[in-house]
Image (tube, rainbow, N blue to C red):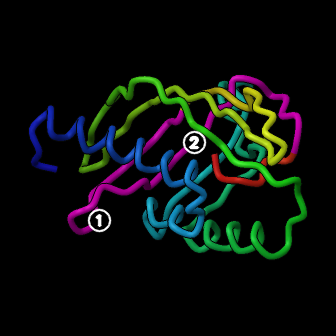
């Protein structure tokens, strides 16, 4: 990546923000497009992440698995209707090597039920790796590290 530092940071922050906006606006079929074809996506607890445990709450090892997750959410899963609103902290670029940018972003997710009830659902950090695919920056790895190991309900929607 030959971008200047401010341009690189802007592109990373834009990717993180656009990702959250996609989920918050319930554009779930667009969600896999934020990832490379050979991506890795995992949701895990802070404790499991610190212990380098390989299995999280769930994981997907390709863009195809992300597409399948959305398809099953729409067609097979039964869950109480709800949506999310992401609150994002500042994104910090933590490294860059061989064209892969590493970053971390804190987040909180408010879950809004169809009844109108809203609760803080999750908080944690996105640990991201991203790279250029054509002229777009895409996630090659996103590890969603939750602050708590307790999740009060099945995670159906992307985080």
**Disc sitting over residue 89 in the figure:** none
Range drawn in magenta: 126-153
Query: With 31 as the anchor, is 80 left or right in this view?
Result: right
Relative depth, front residue between 138 and 77: 77
Q: To which residue does mark 1 refer?
A: 133
Residue at image x 44%, y 59%? 34
Residue at image x 90%, y 63%? 78
Dot 2 lies on which element? strand
Relative depth, front residue between 110 and 68: 110
Q: From the top left corner, tell me how far across and down residue 124 is, in percent.
A: 62, 27
Q: From the top left corner, tell me how far across and down residue 136 is, in percent.
A: 27, 61
Picture quadrant where residue 63 is located? bottom right
In the image, is residue 37 above or below residue 17? below
Relative depth, front residue between 103 and 115: 115
**Disc sitting over residue 143 in the figure:** 2
Rendered-image quadrant of the C terminus: top right
Query: With 94 as the anchor, is 78 left or right in this view?
Result: right
Look at the image and say whether residue 98 sits in the magenta stretch.
no
Alpha carbon separation for disc pair 1 and 2 = 20 Å
Residues under numbered marks 1 and 2 in contact, where contact means CB atoms less than 8 Å apart: no
Q: From the top left corner, tell me how far across and down residue 87 is, in percent.
A: 54, 30
């Amino acid at each position: 990546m030959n971008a200047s530092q401010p341009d690189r940071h802007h592109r990373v922050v834009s990717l993180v923000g656009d990702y959250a906006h996609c989920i918050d606006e319930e554009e779930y079929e667009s969600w896999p497009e934020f990832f490379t074809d050979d991506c890795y996506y995992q949701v895990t607890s802070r404790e499991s992440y610190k212990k380098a445990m390989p299995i999280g709450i769930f994981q997907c090892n390709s863009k195809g698995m992300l597409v399948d997750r959305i398809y099953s959410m729409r067609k097979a899963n039964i869950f109480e209707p709800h949506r999310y609103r992401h609150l994002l902290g500042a994104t910090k670029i933590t490294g860059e090597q061989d064209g892969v940018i590493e970053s971390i972003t804190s987040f909180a997710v408010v879950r809004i039920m169809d009844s109108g009830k809203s609760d803080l659902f999750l908080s944690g950090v996105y640990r991201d790796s991203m790279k250029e695919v054509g002229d777009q920056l895409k996630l090659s790895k996103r590890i969603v590290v939750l602050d708590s190991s307790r999740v009060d309900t099945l995670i159906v929607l992307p985080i």
